[in-house]
Amino acid sequence: MIDGLAKDLADLRSRGGRLFILGVGGSAGNCGHAVNDFRKLCNIEAYAPTDNVSELTARTNDEGWNTIFSAWLKVSRLAADDALLVFSVGGGNELRQVSVNLIEAIKVAKEQSARVFAVVGRSDGYAAQHGDRVVVIPMTDETLTTPISEAFQAVVWHCLVSHPDLQVKATKW
């Protein structure tokens, strides 16, 4: 799965597409770090809406939590050459109203024919069910789904930015 995702990201870079990395909670914390690595090590134009706390909180205050990412993607002119990379524990659940903001972003991506990639801890969430390339972190203990998912998001993206198909600049260490 990592090799396939690396190939997809190399294709994204070669066509000049942008990578938008989305997550909430601890996964949001991973987004900014991943943006840095994809930009610096792989020469992929990457962005995370969670890096702009002013816009994020203004959108939440004025428009509501559910549309913060989808509205941001529309202003960013998300297009067919672009892709989302979703970091999430559950991947969103419409029925339970969990991570609806990620679900709405995925819907916008699909409307624009942009690719959707995800690294998630559950195979039954919206991202896993609607993503084009999804890495599902295997669970050995369901009570640890959140910490294992969020920790392995970092492992997966570091494997990607170090992948020979993607990495163009070596790390110092």
Image (cartoon, rainbow, N blue to C red):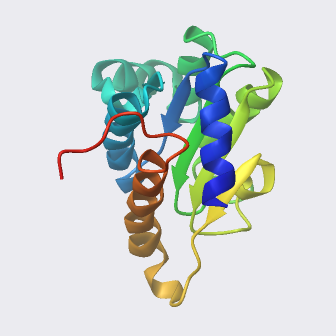
Question: Is 110 located above or below residue 58 in the figure?
Answer: below
Q: Position of residue 157 (x, y in %)?
A: 45, 52
Q: Position of residue 79 (x, y in %)?
A: 70, 15
Q: Residue lying farthest bottom? A: 141
Q: Position of residue 103 (x, y in %)?
A: 67, 42
Question: Is 113 located above or below residue 116 in the figure?
Answer: above
Q: Residue 164 vs residue 39: left or right? A: right
Q: Quadrant of residue 147?
A: bottom left
Question: Is 127 located above or below residue 22 in the figure?
Answer: below
Disc count in the image?
A: 0
Quadrant including the N terminus: bottom right
Depth check: give the residue in front, 105 or 57.
105
Q: Residue 160 vs residue 8: left or right? A: left
What residue is at 56 percent from the left and 9 percent from the top?
75
Depth check: give the residue in front, 82 or 71.
82
Q: Position of residue 168 (x, y in %)?
A: 41, 34
Q: Residue 131 vs residue 135: left or right? A: right
**Residue 108 visible from this viewpoint:** yes
What residue is at 69 percent from the left and 39 percent from the top?
116
Q: Residue 114 vs residue 49: left or right? A: right
What residue is at 55 percent from the left and 43 percent from the top?
165
Depth check: give the residue in front, 81 or 51.
81
Question: Is 92 located above or below residue 149 in the figure?
Answer: above
Q: Quadrant of residue 150?
A: bottom left
Depth check: give the residue in front, 2 or 118.
2
Q: Quadrant of residue 34?
A: top left
What residue is at 35 percent from the left and 55 percent from the top?
26
**Residue 91 visible from this viewpoint:** no
